[in-house]
């Protein structure tokens, strides 16, 4: 069995870090600077009979002013065609306008949606995280919500288990 897994989310939320950790190698460049990933990139993970093809997407930009930004938006949208699962990476605390824009692009998709609530290692305020998770569950009732840390690999096993059910 083989399936395409699109990893979407606003810039700097941890998409490339997540894919690198899952694949155990540096497929995508990660950086504190947004816009490090300029093209969609593929990485394949095979486990038993299941082969998952991860697609890293450049962030979607609210204001696609420059040609590069417009190109990056187009690439991210192209990745959403013919996918089997979408992983929507969001921050553990905040929902921004850019998250809303990404959500607008994916909410109509018929494939299963996993919301990866990233950077949960930075647990400065646990009750805030819990109320954010509740808020996300109400906003995206069709999604599986998984708090995790791409950087430290926390809860990635749960995420990968959900992905392998595609
Ligand atoms: P992308 O633009 O969505 O691909 O984001 P990157 O993967 O390039 O990550 C952006 C920044 O967030 C980098 O500095 C990462 O080290 C950091 N980052 C990513 N995941 C985590 C995480 O789980 N915890 C923490 N504390 N930082 C993270
Ligand atoms: Mg990236």
Image (spheres, rainbow, N blue to C red):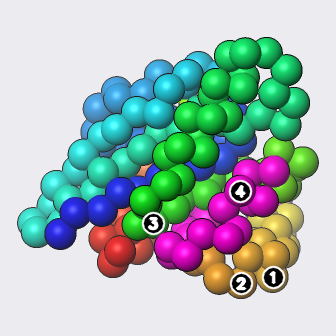
Cα distance, mark 2 to mark 1? Answer: 5 Å
Mark 3 vs 2, N-terminal side: 3
Tag shown at residue 138: 1
Residue at 77% across, 34% down: 61
Report the residue marked by disc 4.
105
- As helix, strand or loop, the secondary structure at mark 3 comes to strand
Cα distance, mark 4 to mark 3? Answer: 14 Å
Cα distance, mark 3 to mark 2? Answer: 16 Å
Taking 7 as reference, is 161 left or right? left
Report the residue marked by disc 3.
85
- As helix, strand or loop, the secondary structure at mark 4 comes to helix
Q: Nearer the viewer, residue 115 or 92?
A: 115
Is the residue under label 3 in contact with that under label 4 (CB below 8 Å)? no
Mark 4 vs 2, N-terminal side: 4
Report the residue marked by disc 2.
141
Mark 4 vs 3, N-terminal side: 3
């Amino acid at each position: 069995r083989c399936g395409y897994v699109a990893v979407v989310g606003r810039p700097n939320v941890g998409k490339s870090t997540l894919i690198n950790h899952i694949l155990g190698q540096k497929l995508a460049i990660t950086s504190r600077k947004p816009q490090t990933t300029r093209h969609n990139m593929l990485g394949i993970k095979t486990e038993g009979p299941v082969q998952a093809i991860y697609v890293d997407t450049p962030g979607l930009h609210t204001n696609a002013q420059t040609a590069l930004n417009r190109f990056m938006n187009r690439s991210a949208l192209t990745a959403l065609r013919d996918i089997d699962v979408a992983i929507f990476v969001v921050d553990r605390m905040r929902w921004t306008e850019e998250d809303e824009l990404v959500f607008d692009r994916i909410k109509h998709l018929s494939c299963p949606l996993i919301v990866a609530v990233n950077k949960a290692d930075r647990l400065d305020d646990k009750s805030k995280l819990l109320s954010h998770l509740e808020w996300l569950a109400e906003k995206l009732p069709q999604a599986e919500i998984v708090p995790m840390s791409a950087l430290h690999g926390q809860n990635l096993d749960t995420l990968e288990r959900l992905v392998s059910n595609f």
